Image: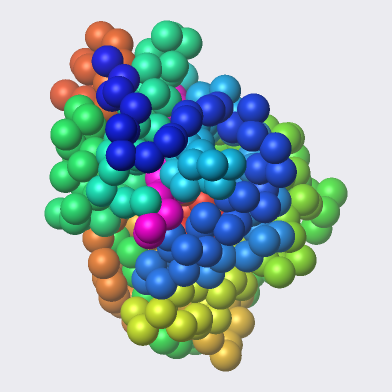
Amino acid sequence: MTPAQPLTRCYEISPHAQIDDLAARIHGLARLAFGTYPGVLSPLEAHRAWYVRRPGMDRDLSMGILCEGQLVASTFVTVAPMRLGGQEMPVGIVDTVMSHPGHRRQGLARWALSASVDEMRARGLAASLLYTVEDSMPARFYESLGYVVHMPVRYYRAPRPARPTGEAAPRRARPEESGAIMRFLNDALAEHDGYIPLDEPLWRWRHRERPAALPAATWVLEGDTGYAGCVTICRAPIVAPDGGQVACHVLTDLAVAPGADPSPTIAGLLGAVPGGCEARALSAECEGAVNGVLEGLGFAAATREVAMVLPLDGEARGALHRAPAHWYALAESVIGV
């Protein structure tokens, strides 16, 4: 049951589809809500204009709360096919749950997210997934709505990743290779729960349509029979612990060909990380081999995020009883890139 409207002020809830000038309003709210939140992307207006065009972003499931015409709380819901418990199912990915600092403790986030969950259940989605900081106030809030911790994820930082000598050198992928790289990633990450299979719209949004302020390049390492590994490196301003900004190179879609040795492959791929600023990466707790390589190359876990899942049907409830052997951490929902 969706919570009743708060009585202390005149609030109204509305799907994002009915909110005018959404990107600008979201940017203004995010700047206030996340401007000093360590580890996330520093609020950029161009980023919000890009992010609301994310494939699968559902403006009828995403909710905003307005007070006298001002957006004071919001949550995004992206619908995508995702592996959970070893099988693909329709999942509502929740992120950017936020409230205006002057309107907190009114139950607005609970109202918005509960309304989104009601709509996801009515739509017939199997589950909802979100990421948050482990053992935090938001994590306890999500638990109160029925979300359960499913997979801890390490948020790695490396001031200067080590560059081992003697490893094969990666090369920058060419534009005409996008189809081959999508096929490689879908094959390499096929057994990873939490993974959204790549298609042309998602690839185009992540790579060709991204804002100039967040440049990204994909690098591949050649093997004897094709690609041995792949990584995308995005330069982005990240909120620092002191509330300022730090320039980072964020690693996404780090993948190793099935059967390949992850140690030399990942070490070789990290040779593409430019100097001049620190690198950041996400990796699930269950990825022992990958984590060992990253830590051997100078990465250390700064914080721990958790993937939390709310099962909406019996299939998803059964999936939560099967511990994943591999997990793909979704950087666009954790960091924003």
**Residue 293 makes an appearance in the image:** no
Placement of 251 over or under 249, stated as above or below: above
Residue 94 on the magenta segment? yes
Residue furthest right in the image? 176
Q: Residue 32: horizontal and vertical position, in percent?
A: 47, 63
Which is the main secondary structure of the residues drawn in magenta?
strand
| Residue shown at 59% from the left, 32% from the top | 16
Number of numbered tags placed on the structure image: 0
130 w.r.t. 125: above or below: below
Kindly identify the residue that appears in the image at 16 percent across and 24 percent down.
321
Q: In the picture shown, does residue 13 fall above or below 90?
A: below
- Asked if residue 134 is positioned above or below residue 161 in the image, the reply reads above
- Residue 78 horizontal side relative to residue 280, left or right: right
Q: Nearer the viewer, residue 191 or 3?
A: 3
Residue 91 seen anywhere in this rendered image of the structure: yes
Instruction: From the top left corner, tell me how far across and down residue 5 is, in percent.
Output: 34, 27
Q: Residue at x 42, y 9 (%)?
A: 122
Q: Find residue 149 and report its horizontal and vertical position in percent.
A: 19, 40
- Image x and y of residue 41, in percent: 51, 65
In reply to whether residue 136 is colored magenta, the answer given is no
Which quarter of the picture shows residue 241?
bottom left
Magenta residues (range): 91-102
Rendered image coloring scheme: rainbow
| Quarter the N terminus occupies | top left
The reply, left or right, for residue 203 in relation to residue 317 is right
Q: Nearer the viewer, residue 224 or 32?
A: 32
